[in-house]
Image: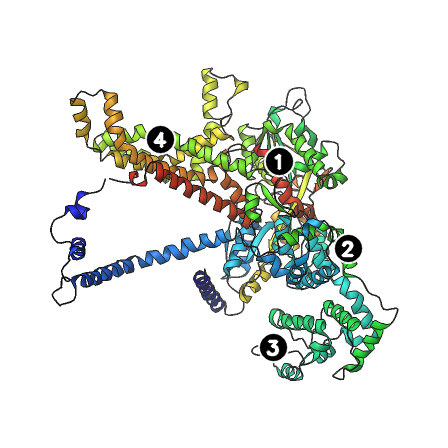
Amino acid sequence: MTDAATEPDKVTGPTPDNALRAADKEDSGPVLAADGTPLKRSLNRALRAQKIRALMLIAPLLIFVLVSFIAPIGDMLFRSVENQIVRDTLPRTVAALADYDAASGELPRDEVFEAAYYDVFFAAERKEHTRLGSRLNYEKTGASSLFRKSGRGIDDIGEVYLDQFEDLDENWDEARPWAELMGDPDWIAAQDAWNGNGSMPEFELRSDISDILPRTAETYEIFARFMQTEEGDSPLEEEPWSVVHTALYQDLAEGDVSGYTGPRADMLQAADALVASADFQTIAFRDGFEEIDEDWVAPEIWQTIKTYSPAYTSGYFLNSIDMQKTAEGPALRDEDERIYGLLFQRTMFMSLVITLSCILLGYPISYLLSNLPASKANLLMILVLLPFWTSLLVRTSAWKVMLQQQGVINDTLVWLGLVADDARLTMINNQFGTIVAMTHILLPFMILPMYSVMSTIPPSYVRAAKSLGATNWTTFWRVYFPQSVPGIGAGSILVFILSIGYYITPEIVGGTSGIFISNRIAYHISSSLNWGLAAALGSILLVVVLVLYWAYDKIVGIDNVKLGG
Amino acid sequence: MKLSKTLLATSALTVAAAGAYAAGHGMADSMTLVSWGGAYQASQQNAYVEPYIAMNEGVSATWDESSAEAVAKLRAMNEAGNITWDLVDVVAADAIRLCDEGLAMEIDHDELLAPAPDGTDASDDFGDLIVSDCYIPQIVYSTTFGYRTDMVPEGVEPPSDICSVFDLETYPGKRALEKRPINNMEWALLCDGVAKADVYDVLETDEGQDQALAKLDTIKDQVIWWNAGADTPQLLADGEVFMGSTYNGRLFSAIVEQGQPIGMMWDAQVFDLDGWIIPTGLPEDRLARVKDFVRFATDTQRLADQAKYISYGPARASSAPLVSTHAELGIEMAPHMPTDPNNAANTFLYNYEFWADYRDDIDAKFQAWLAQ
């Protein structure tokens, strides 16, 4: 296969490689170039310059491929393990769940409910709770509506406190008094002076308020910053969320504000007295969640959150091999939910069958093409290429017309009396239909490499074999066929790799038994939106292809693949 | 990744800047509308896009026939930070998901949409059909069965009961069903003795799901599963199947416009909605244009006009009395509407919330069952 002219040691005379070799062998002092530098270094420099120039030439293509091909694929594959949404949306809950034993089957501590209250509240304001619900719904049925419902109902907990504080003093549901209580005086002045142009002065907490009312300060700051950046509203004019009142209640119940003398001290101390009084109503976070939905007081949702709290998860990969992450570790799915193993096997098997039928059909055609006179071969070549110029959908739909029960083939067979009218053959919406249609569509990818290899086999070899007394079969099998193997190899790799990723044709003619794993990938990308699972399935498919390619290289040798003369 | 994001962001900015410059007076002068293609998109073009363009000189509308993949594509656009669509036509379930994902804009229906001619607020006029805060319903359609009238066995009444789908003895022949659990599971349970009110309660349980699949199992080898709404009319026209489910408008055009020997079996038709959502993150000038258009396109008269071109019921209560005759054939449209009292004797309401929760779970089971 290798051209003799490129093998260095067979070339006599000065080439850069040979000169380097010669320089290495030299025992006595380095050979010097004309300018006095050692020849080796000077040559290396010249070669390096050449290499850089070559690299510069291909740089546009390289960058294009990196940016438009490798990077998006890498990004997509990364999604198969990425799972930051849970910890980004529920940071406090994830932290509080750290010591929760998901396998215990018990409810988590009350602190977890408290953390979840704040998390869900903020997520609902940012409209991120439903997105998390959709994510968790892939693992736990019902999470989607649970989070949607909670986004609507989470206000009820805070309103218990809001209403009581408001009954005590109207100012507790006003924007300005809250801002004076929590905000830095300089910031309030700056915000007052702000005339609507440019960006708002960023909210600052008053210096000591965090010590007296830690939770309230934290939640109010989140509220104020959110109003400024997301809504573009001034916190001086917006009443705080009810979550701030919940935080205030918690702070007042635990801390001591009697020494507070800052702005609105009277208002705060009156509220403190109210919280201390016997008839102040409270609601436990757990009860509040139970009122929203009873699923919150069942352990399953907490187990799911706990199981999926790490930033990276093997969950998608487990799902794509018919397993699932449970509190006790990975486990096989129920038998009636297993599908991906079957589909992977089927995809491999059918791709193999399609590749083999392409070889069987393509080999004689390529042989004919390469042995006919040029004028006739060109005409045949156009016939081979013609399907390439027809839309894939048209070709697939044409097979539908041909193969269906009231279709051309069945009609002909009935007319010939070969099959009875009430026993027409089922040739579509099954594996057979997929194999026929895909073999037809992929055939040119087999014929073209085979043809280009066969057309370089010198006819003199065959004539020589025959003149030495070989039979037609021996000539073909011992002389011609071995030389055509690289074409078969190249065609098979092309057809096999194309067919395991095919999905349009199986979708249209495959029915239920003729669909591929790629149909499920397409479903998860465009319909269920479970991109993580689609990415995991895609990664597995990619790895399988690479493994097969590697095995092919080991068994047949990739040097034996030729796409052209 | 960073590089490609920067590139995308830069190009998005350039496009946005160019758009803002072209608008001049606050409204962009072009819109990209997303719909389903075919007769449905044509009805939208005729009923409201053309009148709107005639009223607003210099405005142009481009169609993108991507509604089937709208959720995935909008999510991808959102991640790339470059929303190229202005108004997207989706079914209700997709609208709920887009709203959940924060990809569709929440709207105030009374403020954005025109009131009915008698002054009723838009939210009352649309009523329960506003299934999501992001959704502007246009039409009510139904998924129902059609059958070949010439393939009904002799001496047998044509099918008029949903359970004839499962009755292979009386009505032999193949069936076309959609390749997804939604609707099929409900019909199977209805015909397996479950009362209509209990269907979703039963379907919540593993036993209920098994029961529905077992019922479907009785006809499994006689079913051709379809993916696109056009499949069933084609299969019926070719005589490949005896009966099949699809959208009522598709059957209408096969029967009335193409004269195929197909009959409608309205029993247990499942109502669903189609309507607009506005993507989040539109620049101000484009948003202003879209709001202006959508207010016009969903007023009482425009929705009634749409029914001239396709047999889907207008989503506004006030539009129903204005529904007139087919634009070309001149026939009365009202009797072909899924909401007509004669057709709606026994209807089934699609439960959006149930399917939002159970879709992934039941779909996994359904696909595993299919593949067996």
Pointers 2 and 3 in contact (CB under 8 A)?
A: no
Q: Quadrant of residue A243?
A: bottom right
Hey, what amino acid is under mark 2?
Glu
Q: Earlier in the sequence, mark 1 or mark 3?
A: 3
Q: Secondary structure at mark 1?
A: helix
Instruction: Measure the C-alpha gap from mark 2 to mark 1.
Output: 33 Å
Name the spot of residue A68 as percent of width and height, x first. 41, 55
Q: Secondary structure at mark 3?
A: loop
Q: Earlier in the sequence, mark 4 or mark 1?
A: 1
Q: Earlier in the sequence, mark 2 or mark 4?
A: 2
Hey, what amino acid is under mark 1?
Glu
Q: Which residue is mark 1?
A: A335
Q: Are marks 4 and 3 on the same chain?
A: yes
Q: Earlier in the sequence, mark 2 or mark 1?
A: 2
Q: Which residue is mark 2?
A: A290
Whether residue B241 sits left or right of residue A210 in the image: it is: left
Q: Which chain is mark 2 on?
A: A
